[in-house]
Image (cartoon, helix red, strand yellow):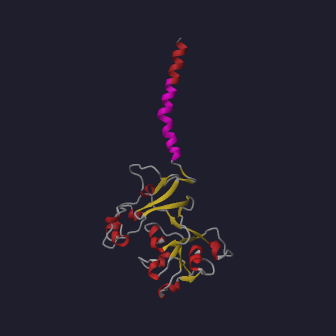
């Protein structure tokens, strides 16, 4: 009889142990991956008090990882924790009506390898751009655009988006489409132009652990209104954010 009581007590204890402890373990494990992308420090998918600004920048929805900004959510294709870079994916040949500059996505973060742009079907070309842009029609083309035009689409390659003037928009050059690209670190000097670049925007997150007063840059009269660390605060706290981006 005594043995039965002890057995029942053990079962009761194990049942409660499972209920109270295992859900928390399961929850922790479920946040370590979003789809096939591993999430670890300095990022987190859990909202916790006192967490770093970087930990608030990722969102996992339906097992798809997104980079959270004041301009919207941008899909993340990979995170390299060794190189401390995050890659935002981008479809080829996007309409210029929905243009977001790579320099805006990386604003507030340390400089990384230059992010580049492909501009398609541009009817104008400014002289200042000639020094850092090249004709890439023989290397790249917008297939959907070429099919609609029934001829090859023209292409201009901007090697470093940081060289573009603030507020640049492909529509200013009457470019109908664009692509965000970055240089593939594994490419060699013998690689073709097309092999050296991949679709997307690469962002470096190698920043100090402590980032004080991250909204101060927004509140200045000439505040930087990028979507990186300086724009975690609400967009209208930026002096010009809502005027530039019409958020």
Per the image, is 132 magenta? Answer: no
- Residue located at (51% from left, 61% from top): 75
Classified by dominant secondary structure, the portion drawn in magenta counts as helix
Toward the viewer: 126 or 107? 126
- Residue located at (48% from left, 88% from top): 127
* Position in image of residue 35 (x %, y %): 56, 52
Q: Quadrant of the C terminus?
A: bottom left
Toward the viewer: 10 or 149? 149
Which segment did they paint magenta? 12-30
* Position in image of residue 78 (x %, y %): 56, 60
Asked if residue 203 is positioned above or below residue 171 in the image, the reply reads: above
Residue that extends furthest to the right in the rendered view of this protein: 190
Residue 114 in view, yes or no: no
Per the image, is 24 magenta? Answer: yes
Residue 150 in view, yes or no: yes
Count the marks. 0
């Amino acid at each position: 009889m005594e043995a039965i009581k002890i057995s029942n007590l053990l079962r009761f204890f194990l049942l409660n142990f499972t209920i109270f402890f295992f859900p928390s373990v399961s929850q922790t494990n479920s946040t370590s991956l979003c789809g096939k992308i591993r999430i670890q420090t300095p990022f987190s998918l859990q909202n916790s008090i006192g967490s770093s600004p970087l930990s608030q920048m990722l969102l996992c929805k339906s097992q798809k990882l997104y980079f959270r900004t004041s301009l919207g959510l941008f899909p993340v294709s990979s995170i390299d924790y060794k190189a401390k870079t995050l890659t935002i994916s981008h479809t080829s040949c996007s309409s210029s009506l929905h243009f977001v500059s790579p320099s805006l996505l990386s604003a507030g973060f340390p400089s990384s390898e230059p992010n580049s742009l492909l501009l398609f079907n541009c009817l104008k070309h400014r002289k200042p751009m000639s020094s850092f842009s090249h004709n890439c029609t023989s290397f790249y083309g917008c297939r959907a655009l070429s099919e609609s035009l029934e001829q090859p689409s023209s292409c201009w390659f901007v090697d470093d988006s940081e060289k573009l003037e603030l507020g640049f928009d492909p529509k200013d050059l009457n470019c109908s489409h664009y692509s965000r690209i970055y240089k593939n670190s594994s490419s060699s000097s013998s690689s073709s132009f097309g092999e050296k670049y991949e679709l997307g925007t690469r962002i470096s997150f190698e920043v100090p652990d402590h980032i004080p007063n991250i909204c101060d840059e927004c509140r200045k009269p000439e505040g930087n209104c990028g979507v990186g660390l300086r724009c975690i605060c609400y967009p209208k706290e930026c002096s010009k954010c809502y005027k530039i981006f019409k958020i």
